[in-house]
Image (tube, rainbow, N blue to C red):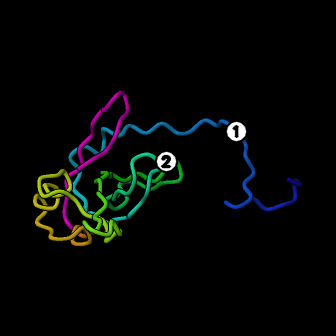
Amino acid sequence: MNENENTTMENPKILGAVDLPKVDLRQYNGKETVIESVTYEEHATHGKYVKVATALLSKTDEKPEIRASIILGLVKIEDKETKELKGYGWGKESKTANFLKKYEAETLEDLKGKNVIVTFEINKGRETLNF
């Protein structure tokens, strides 16, 4: 890439490892916020899932954008006879079903705007913000 070329996501200029600002995620534990987004994504190994995320918890020039989020799994729903994909859903006793019940939501889209309280957790040595 020529130095004068603009870098884009399609044609990125890779700079290598850089120092990133450290953020103490514990400061967000107990913070009240709302669910802002429900996005449907796919992982090569685990298949389809839903990422549910809060509104921004912090946004400054010194820190990255910080949100709390959770991942909810989806399962394929196929026609029993033709095996044709009908769509995606979740089990009646699954984490997804329990999450919807907890927030009194009938659909995943109903989660948007629901009030949540952020929780700080360390899972397998990784710090996360959930709700």
Nearer to the camera, 4 or 97: 97
Q: Is residue 20 left or right of residue 108?
A: right
Mark with earlier residue (1, 2)? 1
Q: Quadrant of residue 23?
A: top left
Amino acid type of the residue tagged 2 in the rendering: Lys
Q: Is residue 37 left or right of residue 42?
A: left
Residue 36 lies, in percent from the top left, at 32, 66
| Relative vertical location of residue 125 with respect to residue 111 in this rendering, above or below | above
Q: Residues within 10 Å of mark 1 (few under 14, many from 20)?
A: few
In the picture as drawn, the residue positioned furthest to the top comes out as 125
Which residue is rendered at x = 31% and y = 51% of the image?
71
Alpha carbon distance from label 1 to label 2 = 19 Å
Q: Residues within 10 Å of mark 2 (few under 14, many from 20)?
A: few
Q: Please name the residue that numbered disc 2 is placed on.
A: 63
SS state under label 2 = loop
Q: Please name the residue that numbered disc 1 is placed on.
A: 16
Residue 122 lies, in percent from the top left, at 30, 32
Nearer to the camera, 102 or 34: 102
Instruction: Tell me, yes or no, whether the two marked residues, 1 and 2, touch with CB atoms within 8 Å.
Output: no
Q: What are the residue bounds of the magenta stretch? A: 114-131
Per the rendering, the mark at residue 37 is none
Which label sits in the foreground, 1 or 2? 1
Find out whether residue 89 is within the magenta segment: no
Which residue is rendered at x = 25% and y = 63% of the image?
89
